[in-house]
Amino acid sequence: MQLDIFEDSRDVMLRNDVLAALVGHQAQAACRAWQTLSQAYPRDELLPSLATLLQALEERDSSDPTRCLFASHEDLRQARVALQDTIQPAALRLFGKESAALWLRPFWQDLVQRAAQLPFRADCEEDHAVPMLLHTKDWQAAVDALARIASWRRIPAPLAWMTQAKLGLLGLQASWGLLAELAWLSPRRLDALLQQAQDPLLQRLTEQFDAEFEPAMAVAGATTDPSADWAWFPAWVLCVRPDWVSHLALAQAGQHSAPEQAMRLMVELLGMERQGRHHDIVARRKSLRDLHAGLYAAYMKTR
C-alpha cells in the first residue's frame, strides 16, 4: 500500500496550528485552528486534550482574577483540583514537562490572586496561596505570604513551606536553622521535603543518612512512624559536617525533645573540642550516648 505523505502530513500541520496558537495564549486563533482540525480529522487522538486547553484559555480570557476573589476555601479547592487533575495532564501530554509548566504558570498565578484573602486553615492547608506559589517556584512571594500567617514557625505546614521557600531563595547553608526546627516539629514533613529537594549536597546527605543512620531501639509492641528518625537528622549532620555548626546553632528553641537536645549537645561538644576541654567532653559524650546510641556511634566514628 502506497502512503500519501502529503495527505498524511496535513494532520500534523493542522495540529501544529492549534498548538502554536495555544502556546501563544491566542484563544480565538486556537479555536479556529481546532475547528479546522476536528472537521478534517474528527478522530484525531489529541483533539480532547487540545479542547481541554482551549476551554481553559477561553475561560481565562473571559474572567478578571482581580475581580473574582474566592469566597471560600471550597471554591479554591474546586478550581485547584480542576487545574491539577484536568488541565495539567492535558498540558503535559501536549507540551512536555518544562513547556507545560511555563504554559500553566499564568493559571496558577490567577489562582494565587483569587486566593489572596483566604486565611490559612490547618484542615484544608493545600487551599491557600502559598502551596501554589511554591509550585511555581515564586520563592519570595511565598515568603511574603507566609510572614502573614500568625505563628507560622509553630505550625507544621507553614514551617515546611517556609523551609522550602528559603531553600529555593537563599540556598542550603542559610536554611539549616529552619530545617532543624522542621525536623523536631514534624519529621514526616521534613522527610517529604528532603525527597523533593533539588540541592545536590542535601540529596547526598539525605541518602547517606538513610543508609547509615542506626535507628533507636524500638520498644516491644510499640508502633513507630518510619519518618520519626528524621528528627535526628540535624544532630547527625553535625557528625559528618561539623563545619556547619554555626548555621545549625541558629535554630530557634522548640519543645526540648530528645532530638533537639542531641543537636544542642553536638553544638556544645564541637565547641569543647575546639577549646580542648577534655574533662567536660567525657560527660557530654555520655549524655549523647544516653539520648541515642546510634547517633553517638556516628559521632565517635569520626573521632
Image: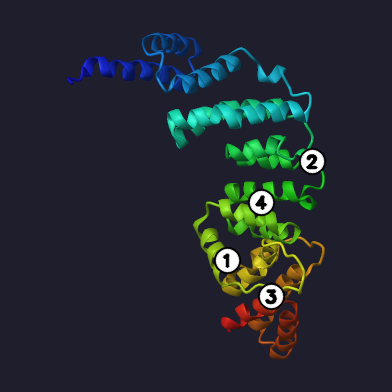
Q: Who comes first in sequence, dot 3 or dot 2? A: 2
Residue at x-position 54% and y-position 30%: 88
Q: Are marks 1 and 2 in contact (CB under 8 Å)?
A: no
Q: Nearer the viewer, mark 2 or mark 4?
A: 2
Residue 123: image tag: 2
Answer left or right for 32 relative to 285. left
Instruction: Give how far across and how far down residue 238 sits, in percent.
Output: 62, 71
Instruction: Give how far across and how far down residue 39 sits, in percent.
Output: 40, 8
Q: Who comes first in sequence, dot 4 or dot 3? A: 4
Residue 210: image tag: 1
Q: Who comes first in sequence, dot 1 or dot 3? A: 1
Instruction: Give how far across and how far down residue 155 sits, in percent.
Output: 78, 50
Residue 160: image tag: none
Residue at x-position 44% and y-position 13%: 34
Q: CA distance from mark 1 to mark 2?
A: 31 Å
**Circle 3 residue:** 266
Q: Nearer the viewer, mark 1 or mark 3?
A: 1
Q: Secondary structure at mark 4?
A: helix
Q: CA distance from mark 3 to mark 2?
A: 37 Å
Q: Who comes first in sequence, dot 2 or dot 4? A: 2
Badge 1, how many Cα within 10 Å: few under 14, some, many 20+?
A: some
Q: Quadrant of residue 114?
A: top right
Q: Secondary structure at mark 3?
A: helix
Residue 163: image tag: 4
Q: CA distance from mark 2 to mark 4?
A: 21 Å
Residue type at tag 4: Thr
Q: Secondary structure at mark 2?
A: helix
Q: CA distance from mark 4 to mark 3?
A: 22 Å
Residue type at tag 1: Asp
